[in-house]
Image: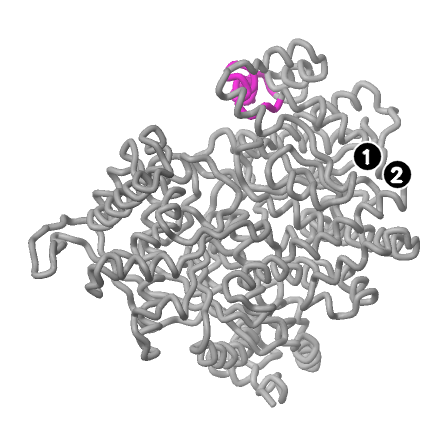
Amino acid sequence: MTILDERPEEEIQKILYQHGAVTIEEASSKELYRAVSYHIRETIGRQMSRTEKNSREGMTMVYMSMEYLPGSLLRKNMDYLDKGESLKKALEKRGCNINDLILEDRELGLGYSDIGYLSNGLMDTFASGSYNAIGYGLLYREGYFRQEIENFQQVEKSDTWWVRGKNWLYKGDRKYKVTTGGRVDISMGDKGLVFTTADTKDLTLRYYDLPYLGYRNGFCNRLRLFDHETITRSIKPLDVTSENRRERFKQEYLLVSAALQDVIRTHLSNGRELDTLNEHFVFLMMDTNLLLAIPEMMRILVDQYKLEWDHAWDITSDAFFYTPLVPLEDTLLTLEGKTFREWLPRLWMVLEEIHHRYLNMLKSTGEVEDGGIESSGILWDDQVRLYNIPGAGVYEGPPIGHPLAVSHRRWILSGNPPLRKLMEEYLGEEFIRNPGVVKRLLQLDDDSDLLQRIAGVKEENKRLLCQELYRKEGILLDPNTVFHGYLKDISSPNRQILMLLWIMDQYLMLRDNPNIDMVPRTIFMGGKAAANDSEGKDTIRLANRLANVINGDKAIKEKLKLIFVHDLSLKKEGFVYPALDITHSLTTPTKGGLHLAGLTAMINGAIAIGSREETNELLGEYAADGSMELFGTTAEEVTRFYNTKEYSSQEFYYLNRNIRRTVDTLLGKNDIIWEGEFRTIHDMLLKYNDNNFVLRDFEEYRKRIETMEADYLTGDEWTARMLHNIALIGEFASDVVVSRYAKKLWQTSK
């Protein structure tokens, strides 16, 4: 029996005396939150220690990511330890409400984008599936930023998650040294060339461990977060801005270097030979930008452990398994040669050696002619092409399924209790550990009782969202309207402007004819724009200006509402996703991105409309007809238009009255916004030829939504589509995706 199974209120009281000299009844919510967290930490720490000892045998998965989105952890950890009810009752005896403590729980600021969702899902599965695994990341003490809206504009404020979020972190006692800068002196030794660095700068990294509990299985893996006093203070967005790219590159290198040092130290401390590293550790590489780990492993083995090149390459090439995510623009997957040489001169030499050996191999085998060298090279035009590194010999996995993965435990168990209860009634608790069984629901897509209950779950979640918005913001909404949503970081390629143009078009139509027969709608938009992204910030300002005008117009009879969800977080998404009827995914084809937010809304029962972007097309292949409506320009057309310059946005502007009236509104016409207030967006669409094809896709987007809203009224037919999207859990839950990787990497039957 664990301490948590005894008298938890007594243990919590001991902690309160130790840290605050107060009783449970006297303690503030903050003090009690900390005491309960520390109380839970004892069981977590015990599980984490036991798991680490047991993991010394067999293979360990190493996963590196620049971002993780674990969210707030008190509710999750209580649930995963099966201690929620006992703690609730213990605190109620002393007059305390556990929900007050959950409100005190801060989300850990370790990410902001889709890669964070994916990484969290994978780590949750590694632990819940009892896989030996360790994750590596960076400790961003200042997170990304907290978004406030002042005078309709985004204002970036400091994210202070560290104040209480650190309650869940375990501080490590080791330090790692990462060497940068300086020069490399080359001399001749007994066994060939000797490379000696001089005038270098050593960076010291400490680390904290974040536990990832398995779901009620006594298993707990570690996410090891490296911390540097300046370089890792805040998240650097992955974008093409030169300064941001340089700072991001430094963060990426600190992560891979410290992670490799830690893995090798662990391996050797277990009494093993370096030769057997790849028999005990496998590196699952999904982020192309972290392929720096491959030349860094070679540098460590050759320089620090004095292995011959071929010997070191055998170890390295067998240890890494690369399975890329959806393609990103090449500019996001390259590094400046000048910056690389200045900051990491010795690693540049290692990379040059890999590059030349790779090209010589291609020439000798006839796999590439002289004309193909340019596209195959790792180094070209003073750029490091990270995406070509695996071709040099690292194991690049064959297609073993898609990389899209979300944690169904995070989004259904914790995030959608009404749906969880319904699924447990039809599937039992098996779906929690084996999400593949959710596909059984597809056999019941004509069961009117089930469909009515699914519709009831959606109605309940819409009411809960309305209650939360009224409690927090004083906003009064009608849950009987159709709920649309697009929650994603805001940028030109993500095309929130397309949704806003549609909203303006619908508002102008309603203003002309308030009595028009239409489905009333409430539209949720949310996301942050990078601090240096003026176009994204203009889009946010436009969204908030429109919301102010539309929501205050009584003449349109509550038929249209726009809500901008400021400072979007996992907590807020946990209310919005389960309530959405229609989720939008509008990224420009070829512009990359996973858009796991759209998938998350779908497994919560939303029907989707999406651009013909790779992720949306993949989801469309698995969804039932009508459950993912695709529209607009294809990836092939985008590429052709970029190459031929034949696209003209002005053609669509002049030929379509709705487009012309809506775009003109951006200049102050139609008395919605001030004259010239959004000229930059207007010029982006017309003067600079609409690089993301917003005007080209506008009309089809508008018509598809019109059709979907008509279908919304069909009752069971619509709900059957919802059921099909909920069943996507059986394909896209991280447990299902990881099991495919496990069979390939470990040859297991999991």
Rendering coords of residue 539 (x, y %)? 57, 30
Q: Assess whether mark 1 and mark 2 are in contact (beta carbons under 8 angstroms).
A: yes
Q: Is residue 6 magenta?
A: no
Q: Which residue is mark 2?
A: 713
Is residue 152 visible in the rendered image? The answer is: no
Quadrant in which residue 362 is drawn = top left
Q: Is residue 686 magenta?
A: yes
Q: Quadrant of the C terminus?
A: bottom right
Disc marking residue 610: none
Q: Which residue is mark 1?
A: 709
Secondary structure under tag 1 reads helix
The residue sitting at 56% across, 19% down in the picture is 685
Rendering coords of residue 46 (x, y %)? 50, 81
Quadrant in which residue 549 is drawn = top right
Q: Quadrant of the N terminus?
A: bottom right
The crowding category of the residue bearing disc 2, from other C-alpha atoms within 10 Å (few below 14, some 14 to 19, many at least 20), is few
Instruction: Identify whether 99 is placed above or below 471.
Output: below
Dominant SS of magenta comes to: loop
The residue sitting at 59% across, 47% down in the picture is 568
Is 581 situated left or right of 306 in this image?
Answer: right
Instruction: Identify whether 494 is placed above or below 69.
Output: above
Is 94 situated left or right of 494 in this image?
Answer: right
Which residue lies most toward the front here?
365
Rendering coords of residue 409 (x, y %)? 66, 63
**Type of amino acid at the residue the image marks with label 1:** Glu
Q: Nearer the viewer, residue 157 or 263?
A: 263
Is residue 478 visible in the rendered image? The answer is: yes
Which stretch did the figure color magenta? 674-694
